[in-house]
Image (cartoon, helix red, strand yellow):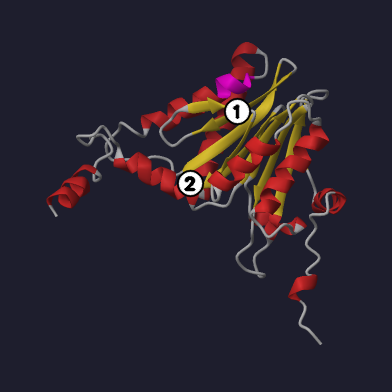
Amino acid sequence: MQGQAQQQAYDRGITIFSPDGRLYQVEYAREAVKRGTASIGVRTNDGVVLAVDKRVPSPLLEDSSVEKIHKADDHVGIASAGHVADARQLIDFARRQTQVNQLRYGEPIGVETLTKEVTDHIQQYTQVGGARPFGVALIVGGIDNGEPRLFETDPSGTPYEWKALAVGADRGELQNYLEENYDDEADLDGGIRLALDALASVNDGSLLPSEVGLATVDVETESFEMFERDRIADHLEENDLLDTGEDDEPDE
């Protein structure tokens, strides 16, 4: 009982380390990320792929209002997992930083620079009283001088660079799938295939176009592109991942 009471005392304040060096509020923020639907990022030689699971909880909800992929700048896209409201705050901050860089230096911001600006902002909320950490993880993908870059932001304020990663629900299974199937020589279509295959692997092997978000930033044009539902359906059908709903039909 004493140990439990001691933990409760330490997790009330974000600015206090526990005796074993832990910030409980940051760990709770990571748990919030795990409760969000999955997001995946894949870096290829031809660009970066962002894919998300955006399952709609009710047929009455407009699926277009579920936003998990955002355009931060012409050459940068961001996917999120965790608290949607926290994600929107960080997306808005990232967008402001891209504009500040453009006005100040007359050039697009670097993907690594942008990620570190965001994680510096996140980190401030791990050492200031009266505030809580952001309960969201972001995948930041884009092109830096013709080179694809892919980063993760953690609720602690730490940036990581990846070749491919997953955040949110089922991260362990998704990450294992990516590690087993990632190909350094894959093109952009190969990256899309890997990301969709990974999402399908934790969704009974098939996906609905309305419940998937997909975007790319390719090296040739250095521009962010969000895929429409019809195009997502084409990719799902091409890779035998399209959920036709046949299993849901009652037997005659």
The quarter of the picture where residue 225 lies is top right
Q: Quadrant of the C terminus?
A: bottom right
Give the residue at x 81% y 65%.
244
Q: Residue at x 43, y 41 (%)?
A: 134
Amino acid type, mark 2? Val
Relative to the observer, which residue lies in front, 156 or 240?
240
Sequence-earlier tag: 2 or 1:
2
- Which residues lie in the magenta part? 109-114
Residue 33 - label: 2
Badge 1 marks a residue whose secondary structure is: loop
Kindly identify the residue that appears in the image at 76 percent across and 82 percent down. 250
Q: Is residue 110 magenta?
A: yes
Above or below, 109 relative to 14: above
Q: Position of residue 99 (x, y in %)?
A: 61, 24
The mark found on residue 162 in the picture is: 1
Q: Position of residue 121 (x, y in %)?
A: 44, 29
In this image, 29 relative to 15: left or right? right
The image shows residue 25 at horizontal and vertical percentages of 32, 42
